[in-house]
Each structure stands twice: as structure tokens, then as C-alpha cells.
């Protein structure tokens, strides 16, 4: 499968989507601008992985420690099934009985299983293969550089302005982070609406920095997760001084952070 292939089924599961990660998975299947949000959420969400129920390993949420041995259920092709919620295990009634599982934060799981291939939600309408190279680029942050461009079609109506409800908590936390990262020159904020189907604008943090966006997004992304409601989406972009949306931030707004 490709990066965001949709598993073709006749109809969508009744409970899907039931959390923010599943909503982002659905949107990322057709909207490239959502993929950074999906990857960030994947790293910081608790993911469900099936175990062989070996003695000494209890069911439930875990932090995998060094030298821990866990036997994960593996398909015949070597892929490890992975789920965005426990209900996804039982989609399409392929699995009919309770099975042992563990809930593990994505970053911990992927770091613990380097070199493995996962298949996310294998029984659901929306699934995704996660190959080792992709997981490695996710862990080192390079995947965010690959996916940080906003693709705007020529007939897309873009609405951009300042948010009605200013995210003071998020801004203060980002300021504290940026002060300790001297390669960040300035940071701006706006609310943007790019899709007629998008009911409300979402936040965009535009950062002017010496280096690559991934140098700061790998820290700012998880920080944003903690400051915003679970249904709110925040995009990061790099100021490129090539016109377009960057001009809005540079010419029509004031940065909420400037390097001293």
C-alpha cells in the first residue's frame, strides 16, 4: 500500500471515527496538508497492539522499559497489526473473541520495535501500512520536512486572519520553547480555512528560522498537543520569503515571538 491508502470496504464502521487520531487518519487519506497532524498525533497517542498473553506481562497501558521482552501478534507476512482504539480490533467481526492487548504511546512503541513493519487498523475502512523507513523518519523528525508543504489548488478559496479566540496558553508555551532555541528568529500565528467542507478555521504557526522546520516542529508539535483541545488542529509552516501565505504573516501581522 502507499503512504495513505484507504482499505476498500463496502461501508464505514458505525463507530469510526471515535477519536482524534482516527479523524486525522480519514482526512489525511485525501488531504496532504493534514499528514503532519496525523503523524504528530500518531507519535503521541496510545496505540493498541495485540500480545500473545505471555506470563508476566499484564494487559493495559504500558511504558516499555529497556530490556523488556514482549511478544506481539504478527501476521504471516511479518506485519504487526496495530489499532487506533480497541474497537478497531473487532471491525467487520473478523476477530470475534477478546484478545490480549497493550496500549502503548506511539513514540515508545516505534522506538522499541525499530525495523518492524506495522499495519494500522487492518480490519477497518481506513488503514495504513507503516514501513521501517517511514517509522525511522517519523522518529527522527525528517518526515515532517517531507510533508510540511500546504498544497493549494488554483480554485481554492483561502480565508486567513487572526483567531477569534487567541490561544494564550499555547503562545506562552511556544515563546518559552523558542527562547531556548536560538535558531528560531520569529514566529507568527493565524487562523486559516482552506476547504469549503472545513466548518471552522484551524490555527497555523508560521516560523522563521535558521534551518529546517523539523528542527523545531518535533518539539513544538507535542507541546501543542498538550495545550489545545483534542479536536483542535494546529499546522506548522516555515516562512520562506517567496510570497504567498508567508507574505500575509510578514506584512500584515506582528510576530508573537522575536529573537532578541
Image (cartoon, grey):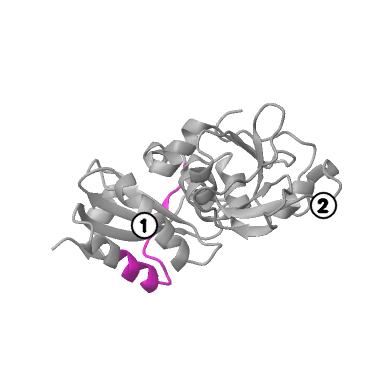
What is the distance, in whole Å, between disc 1 and disc 2 at their CAs? 38 Å
Camera-side residue of 69 and 232:
69
Q: Secondary structure at mark 2?
A: loop
Label 1 sits on a secondary structure element that is helix
180 shown above or below 9: below
Taking the spot 64% from the left edge, 32% from the top edge, the residue there is: 79
Q: Quadrant of residue 147?
A: top left
Foreground of the two, 64 or 250: 64
Residue furthest toward the left? 260
Residue linked to disc 1 = 220
Q: Where is the C terminus found, in terms of image quarters?
A: bottom left
Q: Which residue is mark 2?
A: 98
Residue range in magenta is 156-174
Residue 34 percent coordinates (x, y): 50, 46
Residue 167 at x, y = what percent?
Answer: 40, 70
Q: Is residue 176 above or below residue 132?
A: below
Give percent across and percent down for residue 1. 61, 28
Q: Is residue 120 left or right of residue 230?
A: right
Amino acid at each position: 500500500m502507499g503512504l495513505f491508502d484507504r482499505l476498500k470496504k463496502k461501508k464505514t464502521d458505525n463507530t469510526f471515527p471515535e477519536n482524534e487520531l482516527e479523524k486525522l487518519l480519514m482526512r489525511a487519506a485525501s488531504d496532504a496538508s493534514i499528514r503532519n497532524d496525523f503523524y504528530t498525533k500518531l507519535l503521541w497517542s496510545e496505540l493498541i497492539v495485540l500480545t500473545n498473553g505471555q506470563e508476566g506481562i499484564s494487559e493495559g497501558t504500558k511504558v516499555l522499559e529497556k530490556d523488556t521482552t514482549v511478544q506481539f501478534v504478527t501476521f504471516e507476512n511479518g506485519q504487526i497489526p496495530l489499532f487506533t482504539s480497541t474497537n478497531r480490533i473487532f471491525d467487520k467481526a473478523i476477530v470475534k473473541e477478546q484478545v490480549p492487548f497493550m496500549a502503548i504511546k506511539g513514540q515508545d512503541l516505534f522506538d522499541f520495535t525499530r525495523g518492524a513493519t506495522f499495519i494500522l487498523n487492518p480490519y477497518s475502512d481506513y488503514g495504513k501500512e507503516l514501513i521501517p523507513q517511514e517509522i525511522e523518519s517519523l522518529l527522527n523528525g525528517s518526515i515532517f520536512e517531507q510533508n510540511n508543504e500546504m498544497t493549494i489548488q488554483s480554485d481554492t478559496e483561502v480565508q486567513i486572519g487572526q483567531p477569534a479566540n487567541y490561544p494564550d496558553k499555547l503562545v506562552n508555551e511556544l515563546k518559552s520553547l523558542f527562547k531556548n532555541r536560538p535558531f528560531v528568529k520569529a514566529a507568527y500565528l493565524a487562523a486559516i480555512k482552506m476547504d469549503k467542507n472545513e466548518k471552522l478555521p484551524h490555527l497555523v504557526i508560521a516560523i522563521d528560522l535558521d534551518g529546517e522546520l523539523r528542527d523545531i516542529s518535533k518539539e513544538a508539535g507535542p507541546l501543542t498537543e498538550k495545550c489545545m483541545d483534542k479536536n483542535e488542529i494546529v499546522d506548522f509552516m516555515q516562512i520562506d520569503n517567496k510570497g504567498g501565505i508567508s507574505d500575509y504573516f510578514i506584512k500584515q501581522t506582528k510576530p508573537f515571538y522575536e529573537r532578541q
